[in-house]
Amino acid sequence: MWRPVLVEMRYVKIRSEWLGHSDCSTCQVRSDALFSVLDQADIEPIACKLDDLSFPASSVVFHQGALPDAVYTVREGAIKLIRYLANGDRRIVGVLKPGDLAGLEAFSDEPYSCSGITLGEVRACRIPSSLICSLAEKNEALRRRIFEKYQAALRESGAWLSELAAGSGSARVRMARLLLRLRRSNSCDEVFRFGVEDLGAMLGISVETASRVLAALKRENVLGPASRGQFHFSADLSALERIAAG
């Protein structure tokens, strides 16, 4: 039986701006995206079915419990995956970054297992699942790529549970591990900046503890303001790695 909180969620309007059809040839995350194994000649006939969408900060990309008909490749920004429990509590069970694929449930005809909420503005490519399945029937490389995305999602989910939410180590150690996982990309020293409530929900610690640990990292200059604005930190990655090692 659906709890009221979930019933209410299913009727929240999804806000997004359509920016046109996606151009895979100019996509900054093409090498990490699902269609990285397709040639331009394979993509051109389907380009009119790929939607380039922009979502405002704190907006819903997809709802827990809804039946999916598409997957989303994150192009810019981050999406937090929130699972709402029967008692009304919520758990953040993952974060999707540029190049990640959201909505893998679409391949198994299962409802979304969690809701996707944007951190800051997010740009994503919406790909109909029926289109992917049709292409995969004829393209073995794409079938392998889908399997790789599944495996990556499973590894991330396992790491999230073992290293962060239920992992060993102090709150400070686990916070450092989390911040390293929230790195915007492997080629920069910026990490996505979440509020203390979200950080507490990710690590299974109180808001007060999350706030105290975060304040200490700022005082020690491990974290600082980033040029990209309010949704990022600049980070001393070497210091974070030392703390994360315990």
Image (cartoon, grey):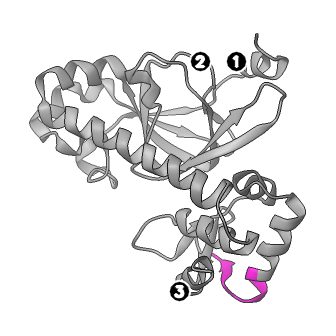
Q: Residue at x 54, y 80 (%)?
A: 241
Numbered range of the magenta stretch? 217-226
Q: Is residue 239 left or right of residue 73?
A: right
Vertical order, 122 against 188 (above or below) = above
Q: Is residue 45 left or right of residue 129?
A: left
Q: Residue at x 63, y 59 (%)?
A: 164
Q: Is residue 200 magenta?
A: no
Q: CA distance from mark 1 to mark 3?
A: 43 Å
Res 25 visible: yes
The spot of residue 163 in percent (x, y) is: 59, 61
Answer with the quarter of the image where residue 145 lies: top left
SS at mark 2 in the image: loop
What residue would you read off at disc 2? 66
Q: CA distance from mark 3 to mark 2?
A: 41 Å
Q: Kindly report which numbered mark, 1 or 3, lies closer to the viewer in this rendering.
A: 3
Q: Residue at x 44, y 52 (%)?
A: 98
The numbered mark at residue 10 is 1
What residue would you read off at disc 3? 238
